[in-house]
Amino acid sequence: MKTISFIGGGRITHILLQAFQNAGISFEKITVMDVNENPLKSLQQKFPHIAITSSHEETVNAELIILAVHPPVAADTLEKLKGKLDKESVLLSLVPKITLEKTVHLLDGFGNVARMNPSASTIVNKGVNPVAFSASCNKDKKKALLDLFQPLGYLPEIHDSKIEAYAVISAMGHTYFNFQLQQLKELALSFGMEENEAAKAITHMLWGTTETLFNSGLSYSE
């Protein structure tokens, strides 16, 4: 997949662009579309090689089209894309709540559709990025998309019905733990630890905690 378009220029688009850059993944063309100029200008300052546009028409010719909009505008956006996607393209939806079945229906039966719920830690290529594919998705297109996203973190292939569960556990989990870990870091600094020393201690503590809880053979109560 050498050409890629993003419909929506918000936070998740920034995260994915950064992760691709971290992994040394380059594209012949990257197009980002948004109706708001501000996020587009911000993205282009960070990633000057991208092309920006406010037109859906300029996004449909890419090999991979990533739908990164909020649920209230998803149906209207898909309506604009209906009948305009190349049959060899893949549409990857990052939209919560809009199922694969509904997405395919809104695209009038377009076959190569996938759905993903990326997590914030994808920005450092440690994401949890569950992906589901429509039954009609071409197997070669499916493999190409899996190969593209593999360097961005953990990439479980799941049933579409589990996307929302992953959203709560692996995507929203960052929101909960970031606060706790920041509090630990601030405590460490107040106790006289250096910042890098505190960061390393907390990182190893967290990995050790998950290993102990899930892989030690001890029960939770033990």
Image (cartoon, helix red, strand yellow):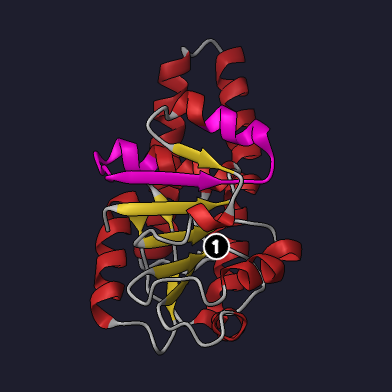
**Can residue 202 be seen in the rendering of this structure?**
yes
Q: Residue 8 location in percent, x, y? A: 59, 50
**Residue carrying label 1:** 94
Numbered disc 1: secondary structure: loop
Task: Give the residue displayed 45% in from the left and 76% down from the top.
Answer: 113
72 left or right of 80 in image: right
Which quadrant of the figure has residue 196? top left
**Magenta-drawn stretch contains 171:** no
Task: Give the residue displayed 36% in from the left and 69% down from the top.
Answer: 89
When the figure is inspected, residue 178 is found, relative to residue 157, above or below; the finding is above
Task: Give the residue displayed 28% in from the left and 73% down from the top.
Answer: 141
Tell which of 191 and 70 is nearer to you: 70
When the figure is inspected, residue 219 is found, relative to residue 126, above or below; the finding is below
The residues colored magenta run 19-43
Task: Give the residue displayed 65% in from the left and 65% down from the top.
Answer: 77
Q: Residue 172 location in percent, x, y? A: 62, 55
